[in-house]
Amino acid sequence: MNVNNIVRKVYPKLTPYKCGLADLPVEEIKAVLMKETVYKLSFNESPLGPSPKVIQAMTDSLYNLNLYPSSAGDSIMKKIAEIEGVSPEQVILSNGADEMIILIAQTFLEPEDEVIIPKLSFIQYLAATNLMGSTPVFSEMKDDLSYDLEDILSRITAKTKAIFLCNPNNPTGAIVPKTELENFLNQIPDPILVVIDEAYHEYAVSPEFESGVRYLNQHKFLFVVRTFSKAHSLAGARLGYGIGAMEVIDAINHVRPPFNANAVVQAGALASLDDIEHLQKAKVLNNQGKEMMYEVFESLGLPYLKSNANFVCFDTKIDSNVIFQKLAEHGVIVRTLKGYGLDTSIRVSVGKHEEVLAFVNSLKEIMTQA
Ligand SMILES: *Cc1c(COP(=O)(O)O)cnc(C)c1O
């Protein structure tokens, strides 16, 4: 008997997390490249790290590791509710935003459902859709690689159960302007779940950005996904959350494992939400890094997208694998967008000052040699 005979029917569509050079932990990249210094700019990780107050809170929590955490995470739910102007019953925690996406899928998706996913967006929406055996329906991007909301609307059928949007979008850093978002939500039929992934919302710089949380009254089944992995620097500790209507949260709570948010990260996240200065510092550092990159892309004549996140997407104008390899030789690891069919584009995370410097200097050297 082969294991293939006993796995679920959807199994052929599922893939384990791939591990190319860009996906390895930094110590392993160093070993592969045989380099002592590596600048890993492929994961959109925060270069700042958690604040000292967060480290202290997490350290203190270690003394109580014999105890189970609060199942729902009441203190954080309350804090988030206070910040967002919603009730605590409208908040739910998860083991990273990735788990939140899976919980949504497990709660709502049936095999006969269709799920609309923009072609150029975070890959986990497709993975969660495939996990449930539902049918992904891909929406085309506009020429400037922004979402085509008209195209999304045109793909709605009686079978559509959910629509995923990432705002600001990974990998482009683009946002959906607030008036467009509002108009869009007004046109979505009642029973459709609209999931807006706001993993990068803290970094948004455009005055046209508005969180989906402001539109919860506009559409009954609107659900906003957030994470502590990016601007809050807690990717290694794993905490995500969702905000939505009480009945949506209640439905997901029927599926959520009871202790999915661990005690250490709950303590850290609470401290992080209180440390507004540290978050501000992360944003300033990020904006400075982006400006440095923009300047170099402009001087090299490489098209790029102004970003509302902590990464920038640019066009190398040649096979991106060539540039990827040459950057890797300089110890700089970025991400090609080959998987999306964009053969000449690269996404680079905004690291700390010396990392951005290493990236721009290496790129300048490579492009002037080519
Ligand atoms: C990084 C990322 C996530 C995953 O966040 P975790 O909380 O670390 O699981 C979710 N959505 C998008 C768009 C991301 O870029």
Image: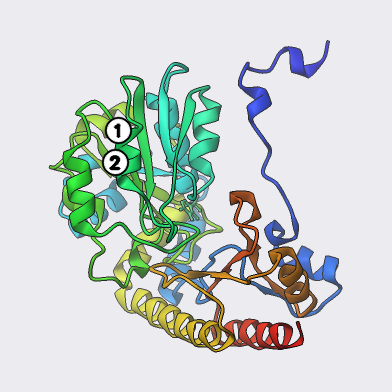
Camera-side residue of 301 and 48: 301
Is residue 65 rendered to the left or right of residue 115? right
> Looking at the picture, how far across and down is residue 308, in whole percent?
38, 68
Q: How many marks?
A: 2
Image quadrant holding the C terminus, namely: bottom right
Q: What residue is disc 1 on? A: 193
Q: Which mark is residue 223?
A: 2
Q: Secondary structure at mark 2?
A: strand
Alpha-carbon span between mark 1 and mark 2: 7 Å
Res 23 → quadrant: bottom right
Q: Is the CB–ligand 1 distance for label 1 below 8 Å?
A: no
On screen, residue 179 above or below 296: above
Is residue 282 rendered to the left or right of residue 210? right
On screen, residue 6 above or below 235: above
Which residue is pictured at 71% across the width and 13% down the height? 6
On screen, residue 62 above or below 292: above
| Of callouts 1 and 2, the N-terminal one | 1
> Looking at the picture, how far across and down is residue 145, in whole percent?
44, 58
Q: Which residue type does callout 1 highlight?
A: Leu
Given contact means CB atoms under 8 Å apart, are the residues at marks 1 and 2 in contact?
yes
Image quadrant holding the N terminus, namely: top right
Mark 1: give few (<14), some (14-19) or many (20+) Cα within 10 Å.
Answer: many
Colour scheme used in the picture?
rainbow
Which residue is pictured at 50% across the width and 77% down the height? 48
Which residue is pictured at 45% across the width and 76% down the height? 52
> Looking at the picture, how far across and down is residue 249, in whole percent?
28, 34
Q: Which residue type does callout 2 highlight?
A: Phe
> Looking at the picture, how far across and down is residue 77, in whole percent?
28, 48
Q: Outermost residue toward the front? A: 143
Is residue 200 rendered to the left or right of residue 346? left
Q: Which mark is residue 202?
A: none
